[in-house]
Image (cartoon, rainbow, N blue to C red):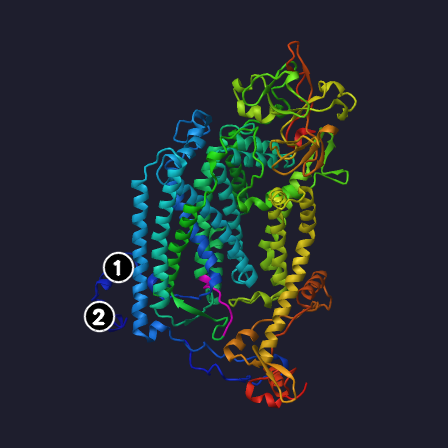
Amino acid sequence: MSSSATGQPYQPKTSVGKITNFVDTRVGGSAIVKEFGRKIFPDHWTFMFGEVALYSFVILLLSGTFLTFFFDPSMAETHYDGSYVPLRGIEMSMAYASSLDISFDIRGGLFMRQVHHWSALLFVAAVSVHMLRVFFTGAFRRPRELNWVIGGVLLILAMAAGFTGYSLPDDLLSGNGLRIIDGVVKSIPVVGTYISFFLFGGEFPGTVIIPRLYVLHILLIPAMILLLIAIHLFLVVVHKHTQFPGPGRTNDNVVGFPVGPVYAAKAGGFFFIVFGIIAAISAAFTINPIWNYGPYDPSPVSAGTQPDWYIGWVDGALRLMPGVLAGFPFEWNIPFPWGTNTLSLNVLFPALVPAGIVFTLLFAWPWIEAWVTKDRREKHLLDRPRNAPTRTGVGVAGVVFYCVMWAAASSDLIATHFMVSLNDVTYWLRALVIFGPIIGFVVARRIALALQRKDREIVLHGRETGRIVRLPHGEFIEVHEPVDEYKRYKLVNFDSPEALTAQPDVNGHVPKGEKRRAWASKFFFEDRVAPVTPAELEEAHSHGHHGEVASEHDKAAISSH
Amino acid sequence: MADHSHGSPDDAVTVAKPGQGGVQKFQDPGLPPHRPRLADVDPRAEKRAERQVGVLFLISIFGTLLFFFGYFFIPLDQTIGTLRLQNLLLGLGTAFAMLGIGVGIVHWAKTLMPDHEIAEDRHEIRPEADRADAEKIVGDILEESGIKRRPLIRNTLLGAGILAIFPAIAIFRDLGPLPGDVLRQTMWDDGVRLTRDPSGTPIKASDVTIGSAFHVIPEGLNEAEHKLEEKAKAVVLLMRLNPESLNPSPGREDWGYDGIVAYSKICTHVGCPVALYEQQTHHLLCPCHQSTFDLTQECKVIFGPAARPLPQLPISVDEEGYLVATSDFQEPVGPSYWERG
């Protein structure tokens, strides 16, 4: 570094230096090494989910590329003559026949199919859990709002990638899935029938849907995902990673390990671990045994069919919606001057409304919270979920809403496995999808508040040691041990916003929007548990409290309470 | 940069920067002291960790060999057993190969690489001065381009740009034909025989005993040009009940034959085949979303998300005793759509 100052030309001495010199004088790589070589990344097990998502996507690209070399996305009719004897001579599409060939006649083909399918399931799961982590810890707040939105779009794209891929083998199961999509599309008012005909190139099933889905699946959607991942990661570098609060960790620093060598080794090694686990699952657990289903035929269907898990909640919503409720049909024939048109709310409503609610709230949440709190400062320190009780409640309500619909996608299997009436399962789930989120909200919020009180208790009176001591006058107490200052700092160092009353504007008026905001603020922060202040701690120690003993040697000081 | 010096963990009461009343806060004690790992202080533990990493990498090599064994030495012989065995070996081989490398590297990082946490300062994403510069540059660019001062250029460009998008939409018009009336028509017509799915053999009324159900396709479907598209609309379920348990509405009394009735198999919800027939209760159940139709009430919806009864196919018998349709369905089959009316 000092060589430039003395005017000496830089002379590489080591072999690493020679390579660096070669690269740097041609592409200017030293800036990248200086920026990233020792960049600090904070470490926490919850930061791993995003990595799992990224790595399973890489595995999807690798295994998917292998599959494209053998898959023929054609709906042309053929007679199967491959190795799987039970289907020999049966008429089927080239897509299905080539999927069977991949499974039975290409060595490692079945393995690659299973790797591809399992990693697709893992990809969507990892994206979802990663988003839950970001939500519950408040990592979506300024300056990361746009990256949160990109993440939401990635989740939608991940589901789209999954669905388009699921349909490609053109087997009976996926064909019925496509038929459901066709039915949902047809329920769209005015343009639904046209979209269906344009999508399928005519009447369902037609001969073009598989090649079209194939282009979406291997080109358009992965390209969009790749682009958004690149932007997503670029923004992570711009923002630097968030970190959990704790001693030494402030809003103005990042505490963790440098990329080289520790973080690179851990993150790089973790790719192989993810790959290894997917390989182990693919070795042992069959997924989507298409040879059992047979080629697509509009007439048969197998009972107990399930979509891939990430489509389940939409399928569950379709199941939960009653077509006729107490004599009131949800399908309406509306007379217009030009004739009668049909509005099929029993299909349209469950297909659009739950997903609409979930994704609208998801995308808008960073701004909703900023509006309620009027807090638009940069937030680089994460919240422990308990320290944001209302947000945690809302998140749990969303999870409950999602999971009830998800369970509904298996209502028939729940009924057959637990020997209960299918109708009752549906009625219960219908009630739960409405009341479950409310109960979930209240319970989660209460638990969060209770955990905050527990934290206060630990700070003020120390941790329970489990040691029971008998005092001279016969009373039994449990010895509490004070927490050390690092642990204590972790428990007291958090923001606990107070409800903000409506503020008048310059003319002394309180605008309507401000009143609403004040109401929301009250709803958010009316019940709050403030962090312990040093004064409170001092008081707790000087007065003693409820049989608490700061440490064993001063237990004599506590005689009564 | 890391600050490990402050305080010992046993410090009982470290209170406070003196502050005012409720706003005072605890002082940040700084990063906890670094705790050395076993491998940092014990050379034997360090050596052991090194060996462990090496063994993990050896496991990876073993995994790769296992993969090759499965690939080259398990010939596929058209039985599902060998296929499964090969899949298992390839999978386990890959799993060991990958996990050996991955766990090895992570173990290496966790035991042997430095574990000192380092603090790095955050900086503003961009300084405000840069923002002002950027604003000025963009302003200058707009000013020099003159787009604000010359509304004629701006408006015509806007118009041209908006219009130029439409060909990109219109060019997709030939993705498919317009729907027209095809959803209202199926292969069924007066005199078309009901045949078994998938063989296409005709069904005699006398073959249909009480309680039985047949999956039915129209005669000639297997030779039809657009077989799957026609089948997706035309499949029918045929059942025979005790004639007294059927309650046909006025005008539909002659749509069945001696207790034999035929209904569209395509669910009116989103189009799955309504494939389950509960003989005892005379209910038809769609396995996809559990819409339930009551055969004794002309397939009225009694449960689930469907909102319309299954369309009935009017049937009779021809002179040879085979079941035939007497017309097409009287309404479109399958899921609802806007133009259905």
Image coordinates of residue B291 in percent, x first then y, are 66, 36
Look at the image and give the residue range highlighted in magenta.
Answer: A238-246
* Chain letter behind tag 1: A
Q: Are marks 2 and 1 in contact (CB under 8 Å)?
A: no
Amino acid type of the residue tagged 2 in the rendering: Gln
Q: Quadrant of residue A68?
A: top left
Image coordinates of residue B8 in percent, x first then y, are 46, 83
Q: Residue furthest top?
A: B319
Choose the circle earlier in sequence order: 2 or 1.
2
Disc marking residue A25:
1
Q: Main secondary structure of the magenta part?
A: loop
Left or right of residue A419: residue B118? left
Asked whether the residues under marks 2 and 1 belong to the same chain, the reply is yes
The secondary element bearing badge 2 is classed as loop
Q: Residues within 10 Å of mark 2 (few under 14, many from 20)?
A: few
Image coordinates of residue A233 in percent, x first then y, are 44, 56
The secondary element bearing badge 1 is classed as helix
Disc marking residue A308:
none
Q: Quadrant of the C terminus of chain A?
A: bottom right
* A244 inside magenta stretch: yes
Left or right of residue A277: residue A353? right
Q: Residue at x 57, y 89 (%)?
A: A554
* Chain letter behind tag 2: A
Q: In the picture shown, does residue A326 fall above or below B143?
A: above
Amino acid type of the residue tagged 1 in the rendering: Thr
